[in-house]
Amino acid sequence: MILNYFKKKSSINSPEFWKKYISHFDSKRDYKIPISHAEFVIIDIESTGLDFKKDKILSIGGVKIKNNQIEVCNTFEIYLSQNEFNPDSALVHGIIKNTNEVKVSENEGIEKFLEYIKNNILVGHSITFDISIINETLRKLGGNKLLNKSIDTINLYKRLKGNDYKVDSSLSLDSLCDEYKIIKSDRHNAAGDALITALLFLKLISGLKIRGVTELDSLLKSKGILF
C-alpha cells in the first residue's frame, strides 16, 4: 500500500507513457511459481557507446519466453533516430547513419518498449548496462527507473558452474554460446542478440533445474540479480 502511494504520488506530473507503464504494477505479482510457468522478456540494446550517461540507444531487441518456450511470433525490434553517430561502435552493430531501417523518435521507441515489456521479468547478458542506459533515457524523457525485476545470464552461469567456475573464464555472449553450442546468427544485432540470449537463458535454467532451482523466487535470489 505504501509503495503504491509513493508510486502514484511521483507519477502526478509524469508523462502519460510513464503513467501507463507503472499501471502494470498495480497488482502484486506472485513469484512463488514454477519457473516453467513464468513469463520473461529477453532484451538487448545497441548503442553509440558504453557510457550510459552520454551515449544513446540506437536499437532495442526483445523476445518473450512463456512456459519455457520462445515466442518467435512475439518479438520486438525498433530503431531509434539519433543525431549522434560513433563510427567505432558502428563496426560492431552495423547500424550506420544512412541505413534503410525505419527509425522512430527516442520518445516513441521507449514508449513502445515499455508497452512490450509491461511488468514482466527482464533477462539480458550484462543487463546492467541495458537497464542503466534505458533508465537514463527515461529520466531525460520525464519518467523514472524501470520497475521490472531483472536477471543477468552471466550471474546464472556463475551460479550453475558453482565451484567449477574459473574466475579468468570469458563470460562474453560469444564464449557462452560456443560452450552451449548455440548458433550465433545475427550477432551484434539487437533482435538477433536477444534471441541468442533467450536460447542461452533456456540452457541455463535447464541446468539449474537439475540442481534443484525450480521456483521463480529462488531463481531471482541469484547473486547480482537486480531488484
Image (spheres, rainbow, N blue to C red):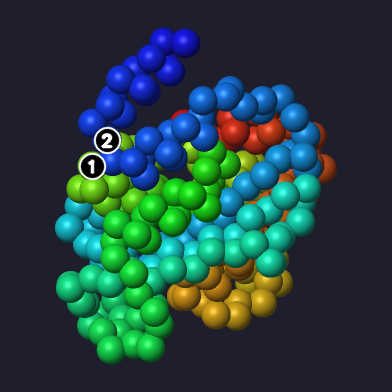
- Could you tell whether 101 is left or right of 122 in the image? left
Which mark identifies residue 81? none
Q: Which residue is label 1 attached to? A: 142
Q: Residue at x 40, y 82 (%)?
A: 101
Name the spot of residue 202 as percent of width and height, x first. 71, 55
| Residue 155 figure quarter | top right
Mark 2: which secondary structure?
loop
Q: Is residue 196 above or below residue 155?
A: below
- Residue, x 39% and y 48% (percent of image)? 131
In the depicted structure, whether residue 110 falls above or below residue 91: above
Left or right: residue 143 versus residue 119 is: left
Name the outermost residue toward the right: 210
Q: CA distance from mark 2 to mark 1?
A: 6 Å
Residue at image position (63%, 72%) is 178
Residue 19 in view of the camera = yes
Q: Are marks 2 and 1 in contact (CB under 8 Å)?
A: yes
Q: Which mark is residue 14?
A: 2
Q: Secondary structure at mark 1?
A: loop
Residue 90, image x and y in percent? 31, 81
Whole-percent x, y for residue 63 in the image? 60, 60
Q: Is residue 168 visible?
A: no
Report the front residue among 59 and 218: 59
Q: Earlier in the sequence, mark 2 or mark 1?
A: 2
- Relative to 60, residue 225 above or below: above
Residue 10 position in % (x across, y down): 28, 25
